[in-house]
Image: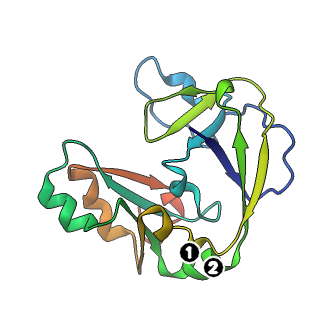
């Protein structure tokens, strides 16, 4: 297994724990997730962060209990689908992000969509610049779907799919 942290900063020698910018309601006993942490994502879920930092996006994939009809309707033959607003497509093609590989032994698994955290400083083991992000999805079995607005997808949270919405506060007409 491999863990990564994605950033637009090309020169991070050490990741220091920091609290989330916008705290969210956490389950009882997990309030500490809003506190100072270093976050990482596993290689199976890294597609969630193959975007410019503030790009709003929705990613979906099947869970074991997802009805087959929903899986076929939303995913077809894809492992997952990533939705992005049309006006972000050029930035996906033009911007470069940096994938930092993190030492697995420094992190604890949250058992939630590939997310891992560390409560202490972490030195990355490797950094790789990534450009032409729009070309990174298909090789991972993920379809990139460009839409005019993410707002019509709000109903996805009522399906049997796993749904991750990231940076939705920046989506047009989301609220």
Mark 1 neighbour density, 10 Å: few (under 14) some (14–19) many (20 or more)? some
Residue 103, how many percent across, how many down? 70, 33
Query: Residue 149, percent across and down?
Result: 40, 75
Q: Element under label 2? A: helix
Comparing 23 with 44, the one in front is 44
Q: Is residue 153 left or right of residue 56?
A: left
Taking the spot 57% from the left edge, 43% from the top edge, the residue there is: 41
**The C terminus is located in which quarter?**
bottom left
**Viewer-side residue, 38 vs 56:** 38
Residue where numbered disc 2 is placed: 93
Cα distance in 3D space between marks 2 and 1: 6 Å
Which image quadrant: the N terminus? top right
Badges 2 and 1: C-beta atoms under 8 Å apart? yes
Q: Give the quadrant of residue 133.
A: bottom right
Residue shown at 48% from the left, 62% from the top? 140
Residue position for label 1: 134
């Amino acid at each position: 297994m491999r863990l990564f942290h994605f950033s637009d900063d090309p020169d991070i020698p050490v990741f220091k724990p920091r609290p989330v910018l916008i705290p969210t309601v956490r389950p009882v006993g997990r309030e500490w997730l809003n506190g100072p942490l270093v976050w990482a994502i596993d290689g199976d879920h890294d597609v969630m962060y193959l975007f410019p930092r503030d790009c709003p996006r929705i990613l979906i994939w099947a869970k074991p209990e997802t009805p087959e009809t929903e899986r076929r309707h939303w995913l077809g033959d894809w492992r997952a689908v990533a939705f992005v607003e049309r006006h972000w497509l050029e930035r996906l093609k033009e911007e470069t992000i940096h994938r930092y590989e993190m030492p697995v032994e420094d992190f604890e698994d949250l058992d939630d969509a590939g997310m891992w955290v560390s409560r202490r400083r972490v030195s990355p083991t490797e950094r790789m610049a990534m450009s032409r992000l729009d070309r990174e999805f298909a090789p991972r079995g993920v379809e990139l779907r460009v839409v005019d607005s993410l707002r019509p997808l709000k109903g996805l949270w009522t399906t049997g799919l796993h749904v991750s919405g990231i940076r939705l506060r920046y989506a047009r007409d989301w609220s």
